[in-house]
Image (cartoon, helix red, strand yellow):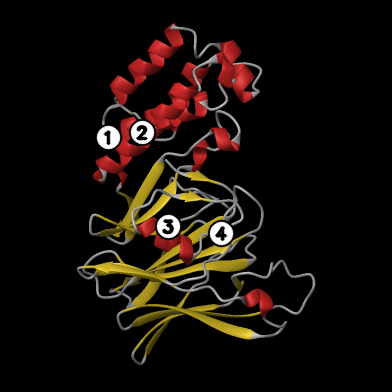
Amino acid sequence: MIVVAAALVGSSLLGAASSGASTNLSSGAKVGAMSARHSAAGVGYHCARAPKSAAMKPGARATEVASFGLYQVRYTSTVPTSKSSNYMGYGMPFPGSLRVVAAKITWPLTSPVGTGFAAIVQLCAIRFGAERHPEILVAGFTGGAHCCDLAAVYAYDAATTKYVKVLDESAKYVARLKYDPNAGFVPRMVAGRVVLETGDGSFAYHFGCYACTPMPRRLYSFASGRVIDVTAHFPSLVKSDAASLWQSVRSNESPASGYSGLFGSLAAWVAERCTIGAGRDAWSQVERLAAQGTLSDANYHLATFVTKGSYVPSLRRFLLANGYCKGQVQ
C-alpha cells in the first residue's frame, strides 16, 4: 500500500525507502538533503544529492552527478533569469543537458518530454542486474499536488551503442504503467534486488477522497530492454500491505466512521489479494460485506459523494479494466 501526499521524491526519501521501511511520503517533503547509495552483489543504485539551487543566482549554471562504478550521469542546467519561467526554486531547472560519462566516452541522452516540467528533482544511476552499463532514472516536477512527479528511464542499447529512452511518463501525462504521479519511482533494495517502488495512481479519488483511496503498491524492474512489473515476485510485501488495508476496512465498517475509508481501502485490498492469486477469497469478503448491508448504495453515496450507482459492480468493472483479478473475479 502506498500512502502519499504532495511530495517531491528526493534522495533522502530514497534512503529511507531502500532500508526496508514502508513508503509514506509526508506532505511538503523537499528534494533530498543526502545522497542515497545502496548496492549488493553488483546490483544497486546511487541517487544524487539535489543542490540548493533556490539559493543560486539567476543565470548561474550547475551540474548534478549520480554515479555507479565508472559511470556517471550528469544533468546540467542554468537558473532562469526570466520572471515568466515556471522554475520554482528547487531541484535543477528544466530544461537542461543530460549525459552519461565513463572514462573518455560520453553518451548524450534525449531529454524527457517534460510536459509542464519546472525542475528535475531526481537523478539516479541504477544497475538492476549483470548489465555493464547502468540504467538511468530521471524525474521532473510540474508543480501542484497529487499529480506531479513524472519519470523517465534510459538504458544502454548494445545494437546502436547508445543510451535510449525506454520509458517516459512525462509525455503528455499519459501513464504507461501502473504508476503514482504524485510520488514517482522510489528505488529500493528488496531481497538483494533493485526495484522501483510506486503505487497505482488509478485508485486515487476513484472511490473517495485522495486520503481515502490508498494505492496498491507496484514494484518494477528492468529486463529485455523494458521496465517490467515484478510486484507478484514479492508476495510477503503484498501480504503485509493487504493486512494493513484490511485493518483499514475493518476500522471503517461502522456508521460512526462515516465509511470514509471503507470503499477505497477495500478496492486496494482486493487488488493486492488478486496480485498474489487470492482474489476469489477476497471477493467472497466483498460479497459478505454487501450481503450484510455495509456496502449499500446509501453508505457508498455518503462516503464518496456520488449520487448514483452501486459499489460492487463499479468495483468489479474498475478492477478488471485496470488489469486486476482476471480469472479470479467474475
Sequence-wise first label, 1 or 3: 3
How dense is the environment of label 4, judged by Cα within 10 Å: few (below 14), some, or many (20 and up)?
Answer: many
Q: Residue at x 30, y 43 (%)?
A: 237
Please indicate whether residue 161 sits to the left or right of residue 100 in the image: left
Q: Which residue is mark 2?
A: 242
Instruction: State the image quarter where residue 133 is shown.
Output: bottom left
Residue shown at the point (45%, 44%) measured from the top left = 2
Q: Earlier in the sequence, mark 3 or mark 4?
A: 4
Secondary structure of residue under mark 1 = loop
Q: Quadrant of residue 51?
A: bottom right
Q: Specify the amino acid type for callout 1.
A: Ile
Residue 249, position as x, y percentages in the image: 45, 25
Residue at figure coordinates x 57%, y 12% from the top left: 297
Q: CA distance from mark 1 to mark 3?
A: 22 Å
* Dots 1, 4 in contact, CB < 8 A: no
Q: As shown in the figure, which amino acid type bears the numbered disc 4?
A: Leu
| Left or right: residue 10 compared with residue 84 | left
Q: Which residue is mark 3?
A: 186
The residues bearing labels 3 and 4 have C-alpha atoms spaced at a distance of 11 Å
Q: Which mark is residue 276?
A: 1
Q: Residue furthest bottom?
A: 104
* Residue 236, position as x, y percentages in the image: 26, 41
Q: Which residue is mark 4?
A: 8
Q: Are marks 1 and 2 in contact (CB under 8 Å)?
A: yes
Residue 289 in view: yes
Q: Earlier in the sequence, mark 4 or mark 2?
A: 4
Q: Residue type at mark 3?
A: Val
Q: Residue furthest top?
A: 292
**Is 96 on the left-hand or right-hand side of 230?**
right
Q: Looking at the picture, how far across and down is residue 199, in whole percent?
A: 45, 45
Residue 18 vs 328, above or below: the answer is below
